[in-house]
Image (spheres, rainbow, N blue to C red):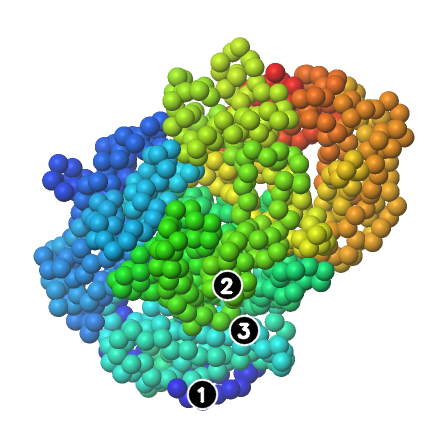
Amino acid sequence: MTLSGNICVCVFGVLLCLFSGVLPGFSSVTVRLNGKWSLSNSNGSLSLPAEVPGCVHSALQQLGYIQDPYFRFNDVSYRWIAFDNWTYTTTFTGSAHLRAAQKVLLVFDGVDTVASISLNGITVGKTDNMFRRYDFPVRDLLKDDNNVLQVSLLSPVLYASEQRRAHSAYRVPPECPPDVQKGECHVNFIRKEQRSFSWDWGPSFPTMGLWRGVRLEAFDVLQLIQVSSVPLHDFNVSQWRVQVEILVDAVQTTNGQITLSIPELDSEQTFQTQFLPGKTKNSFTLHICTTAQVKLWWPNGHGDQPFYQLTVRGFQDGFLVLNTESKVYFRTVELVQEPVVGSPGLSFYFCINGKPIFLKGSNWIPAHSFQDQVTPAVLRNLLQSAVDANMNALRVWGGGVYEQDLFYSICDEMGIMVWQDFMFACALYPTEDDFIQTVREEVIQQVQRLKSHPSIIIWSGNNENEAALATDWFSIPASQRPVYLKDYVTLYVNNIRTIVQQEDQSRPFLVSSPTNGAESEQEGWVAANPYDPLYGDTHFYSYTLDCWDWRTFPRTRFASEYGFQSWPSFSTLQPVSIKEDWSFSSNFTSHRQHHENGNQQMLLQAALHLNLPNSTDPMKRFTDTLYITQVMQAQCMKTQTEFYRRSQSEIIEGKGHTMGALYWQLNDIWQAPSWSSIEFGGKWKMLHYFAQNFFAAVLPVGFEDNGTLLIYAVSDLSHDLKLRAVVTVYSWTDLDPVCTLTSDLLLVPGGSAAVIYKQPVTALLAGCGRCTRLTCLLTFHLEDSSGQRGPTNHHFLCSPKDAEGLQRANITAKVQEDEAGYSVTLHSASVAPFVWLDVGNIPGRFSSNGFLMVSRNRTVGFTAWRPTSIAELSRSLAITSLRDVY
């Protein structure tokens, strides 16, 4: 390919006048085959219409063959669905125009999962990978009318089991999920959403269906499959270039020109090129005009997310044969792993556009068991909820799916950085040629599809598989270990990593998470201890250590998973349960808990600091218990996240410089206990309201170390601040402050955490009058010369269960309506911790919730997601605070 022009065209549009026609005889027709198909099972006893895109479970539910799969115990009752084979059938007309084309492809954007595809009785191809796009040439099989297309799907459970049996040389663990998950076996032998066979926060629904679109593509010259654009910055000459790749399917060798232009940046180039027959990828580099002022894409909280329109036009003999537009966002990303002053090990942090950024966020799991039910509204609500809680990053976890295009487009638009796992999780995998080959195609397609999105800042090969090998999750004898290490390197390093580096030079690749990163690579890709806090990222869970004690957490370089479970609200559980289920000891609550001893762990952790609910009314005791698990989760996650945020600027015993806190997990897949901060359906748990504060751009963090109270000022801002800490001491018995203490103004550099207040608690209390640890508590905030910066925080001097003088607050509420929506004005008779407002099944969210009330009056906003009224909200509103549950 030769470059015929390397100039910036500052008068855009001149070239367009030269090419005003379309090539005679050139045509391209797309016939969408989405919509109503028919669906039947293997023996024909069930036959019904079914939507495409869709899946078998959704089709059965829509026509009333099954109830809501999420109702009570239906995940187990409906196991039979995944053990049957199912066939989708449609009939379409093959127009003369379609059949006259030089090439006709039958394209499937997503088949779930193992299928044989036939057209008019002739098999055209097979599929075995949910994450791949498949296309098959069908021109010669088309008829004028009544073309019959059939997709025959095999039971994924039986297929996985057969693949496991065929792999007789050695076992590839794990064989089956733990019994508590009520799942299916051998999920690592099928390239399908791994969690669909069950997980510790979700049900087992091994889906089958056409989960993405189906179409015919007919063309005479060439068909555009994919355009990707990846901006790269040359720091030596301070110039941007855009790497544009055009993936086409050409009927025959085609010579022509490709013109790339970004008019807003006065940049245009034309290239002579040749498309060879079949599928080819042609790469071009558009150099951006050096005089153009390029606006950069920034993560949420650090700047705007501007984009430019790239136009790609292809010409043959002066006629337009290709014309498409795509968005281009300019940003650079670097993962910095370098020696740390005063510490062994290496740093681990991301620089966006040369600026170190602390990643604040969570982990994303599939939003539904049935992907056809993940609507644009669901995606937008969840991602907006992340942004509204001051998050700037989400990790798309490797046991789900590569998300739909809209997910990444919304992340681009909202400034959410995405850590993108490849879909391998908590398992070892086979490395037979056919398995490797389908994975290679999967990786190529997904990287080509997604690499234009600036939101994706890193690719990661798998979830926890390095750790599984290193810490011997699967009890592999030492003599067999080399076999598994070799398989690991074959799959993730020799294949996935090699492909990613060929396809995308614009962002880093990690082989696993957690990992020691560069150090793991030195140790042959599997480190002795992938959880080492001196390197890489860590996952950390402990349900027995006291999670209000910051010393129990690892002072890691980057925390990419950590969490505690809670139950969702009663309004979320009610539609999928009946009265006999509403007890913490019911079969239902046991059935929904897919994590071993999870229900007991929640109560044991809560009981360390809180009195457990003891109402004699069984219903109240149940709802109070749901509440107390949310209090525990929110306070534990607050303590841990604040520890990571204050650790960003210091090294203690070689550990620290923490530059990321992504808690497990953002969202839920069904109505059940889990680590999420957002319930299935979008309702915020107490944790998510807390996240709004603990991820604030400017945050005071208070904690005790050897009896001394320290308050740190944490700032994500780019500029320096002069801040003071204001500490207010309250008695548990009284809403009037006992005393207020103020520190001097201190300089807090942008992007840092600095100690701003330090005093022994005994001295603080002695100087404050009538206070002991048991009778008093603290609130504190930051101020600059113009007033308060960031949220007000709290510090308990004792466990709330030991608090002397804590009374029932008897909070009353008045609901009002104004132009912004609804507001609730609360009046409290006394100090009230963890004040929780709930309006039952009225969807929406409060401006603040779960808070410590130390004033007589407080007004909270409520945004409703459907029409409501003052009367309905007043009727539905329930208010709970800590002293109300015992």
Residue that numbered label 3 is attached to: 232
Q: Can residue 270 be seen in this view?
A: yes
Residue that numbered label 2 is attached to: 523
Mark 3 → mark 2, Cα distance in angstroms = 31 Å
Give whichever of discs 2 and 1 has the lower sequence position. 1
Residue 529 in the figure: left or right of residue 340 = left
Q: Quadrant of residue 594?
A: top left
Quarter occupied by the N terminus: bottom left
Q: Which residue type carries mark 2?
A: Glu
Q: Which of 478 and 219 is in front in this view?
A: 478
Residue that numbered label 1 is attached to: 3
Q: Which residue type carries mark 3?
A: Leu
Give whichever of discs 3 and 1 has the lower sequence position. 1
* Above or below 177: residue 514: below
Q: In which quarter of the image is residue 97?
A: bottom left
* Above or below 190: residue 700: above
Q: Which residue type carries mark 1?
A: Leu
In front of the other: label 3 or label 2? 2
Query: Residue 70's x, y, as percent?
Result: 36, 32
Mark 2 → mark 1, Cα distance in angstroms = 44 Å
